[in-house]
Structure formats: C-alpha cells, structure tokens
Amino acid sequence: MNDRFLTFSHDEWGRLRANTPMTLTEADLDKLRGINEQVSLDEVAEIYLPLSRLLNLYVAATQSLYQVTDTFLGKPAAKVPYILGVAGSVAVGKSTTSRILQALLSRWPAHPKVDLVTTDGFLLPNAELERRGLMDRKGFPESYDLRRLLDFLAALKSGERSVAAPVYSHEAYDILPGVTSVIDAPDIVIVEGLNVLQAGGGAHVFVSDFFDFSVYVDADEDAVKQWYVDRFLTLRATVFQDEAAYFHRYAGISEGEARRTATEIWDTINGVNLRENI
C-alpha cells in the first residue's frame, strides 16, 4: 500500500459527513443532473456532502490565512476566491459533479457566492480550429486559448473584483462571439474541464497552479465509453433534432448507425484524449 495516499471505502467516506445537513431537495437535484445521469439524494449524502464539508473547512482556513497576511502587511483584506478544479473525461459526470458541489457549497454560510466556469468557453473558435487543422482535436490541450485561460485565473487570484469569461454554446458547438459571463466578487470559483489538471508540453505555468483544491472524476474507460454512446443516442433524439444544432446531421440516422458513429468518435478522439492528456 502506498502511504502517500488515503483510501476510503464507501461507508468510511460517508461517515465523514458527520452532522452536515442535507440542503438539496429532489427538485434541486433534478435541475443538476446531466443527461442520462441517475444521481440520487442518497448518493449526494454519502459522497458529495462529506466532500463539501471538507471543502468548507479548507475554504475557511484559506480565508483566515489571507486575513492574517493582510493584517501583517497593514492593508485592507482583499477578497481572493478559493478555486476548485474539477477534471475528468467526456461523459464521466464531471459537469454534474461540479453543479452539485456548487449548489452544496453555496449553502454554507461562510461562502454563499460560488461561481462555476467551464473551460469550454476557452476553446479556440471553430474558424481558428479549422485554420489550424484542429477540428478533429477539439478538446485536446492544443485546441484551447491557454493564454486567455491563464490570464483569467491570474486575474481571479490577484483579487480583481469582476473578471469576464467567454461563453460556449454546445448547440452551436462554438464560442459565442462577443458574449461573456462576468464573475463578480466570488467566494469560490469551480473551474471544470477536460484538461485542467494536464501538465507538460513545455509550459512554465499550468492551469492547476491556480487551484487550491482539485477533484478528478474517474471511472473505468469501458463504462465511460458506454455512457458516451448512450448520451449520444439521447442527444440524437432531442438536441440534435433542432435544425440550428451543429450536429443536426445526426438526427435522422438509424440507432445502429448512431451507435457506430458514437463509438468511432470515442475511439478516435475522446478515448485518445482521455488516455494521453486527461
């Protein structure tokens, strides 16, 4: 056993919830679940509540440290957000994990303002990806505007009150030109994305350098692949039916063809990115 790590059974982890109250209802959870995801309130209580309790303790300690430092320097206390990174494969459930954590953490009295930013907004626009020949590498590290993402995180950590993040449309499968989401004086910022924990490539600064805490959402690849295929089938019958959707061309294909298409996308893109980068 590697003593660098702590490993918990399901029951052991669940007991670390202690007396943390459940602050979500079934109606709340319905709004937070992703497509085809069956997260229950029991799972929230057993998995997410202990994590929210741990994070609450970390946030409180970090806030106190900033206050002590500012007192020592004799300057007004700056509000620097606690940044939580959430990484994982396509279809592994990281977006639902992030939304549930956002909802739980925002209900703690010491840090009610919790913002969620996805790194999809920092993808290069499709026109630029086409110019660079990277459309088939969308989601790989080289498909992001890394400098813009690092500047965004640096601004947050320097205590700037309002910081703008670009917005991505999954329906259009592209950045929305000129559209931003303003992160204003947050207590916590959750940064969710495929490669936010990726290191290497000769860079001197990594996205994860700005994180106070990191979560990696993991599952067996065969399971994630099946979840991806199932989600593709659901989208084919729903979102892809919209003529304005980027993937509308898949709306009319048969179920068998849809399964083959989703499997090929996984085998040639998403699975490769998972193994090589995520």
Image (cartoon, grey):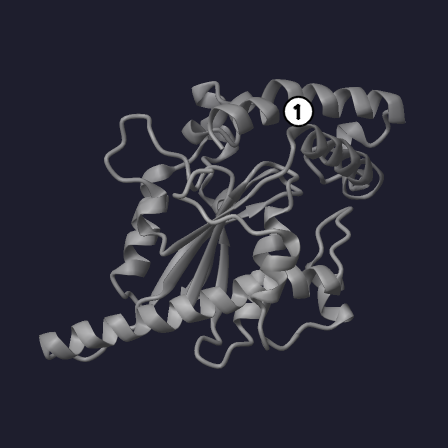
The image position of residue 257, as x and y in percent, is: 84, 20
Q: Residue at x 49, y 46 (%)?
A: 121
Please report the residue visible at 81 percent of the width from the left and 34 percent of the height from the top. Answer: 233
In the image, 144 versus 20, the foreground residue is: 20
Quadrant of the image occupied by residue 21: bottom right
Q: Residue at x 44, y 79 (%)?
A: 110
Above or below for 100 versus 265: below
From this viewpoint, is residue 78 visible? no
The secondary element bearing badge 1 is classed as: helix
Could you tell whether 35 is left or right of 71 in the image?
Answer: right
Up the image or down, 130 lies above or below 189; here it is: above
Closer-to-camera residue (117/226): 226
For the residue pair 182 and 105, the one nearer the viewer reads as: 105
Q: Residue furthest front?
A: 1
Residue 177 picture location, percent across and down: 49, 46
In the picture shown, does residue 147 fall above or below 135?
below
Residue at the left extreme?
Answer: 73
| Residue of label 1 | 266
Please indicate whether residue 181 sits to the left or right of residue 50 in the image. left
Residue 225 visible in the snapshot: yes
Q: Amino acid at mark 1?
A: Trp
**Horizontal and vertical percent for residue 31?**
72, 63
Task: Report whether 3 appears left or right of 223.
Answer: left
At x 44% / y 43%, what residue is drawn? 122
- Give the class, few, some or many, for how many residues have Cα within 10 Å of label 1's Cα (few <14, many ≥20): many
Please state the horizontal and vertical placement of residue 222, each as a whole percent of the image.
Answer: 70, 28
Instruction: State the count of labels.
Output: 1
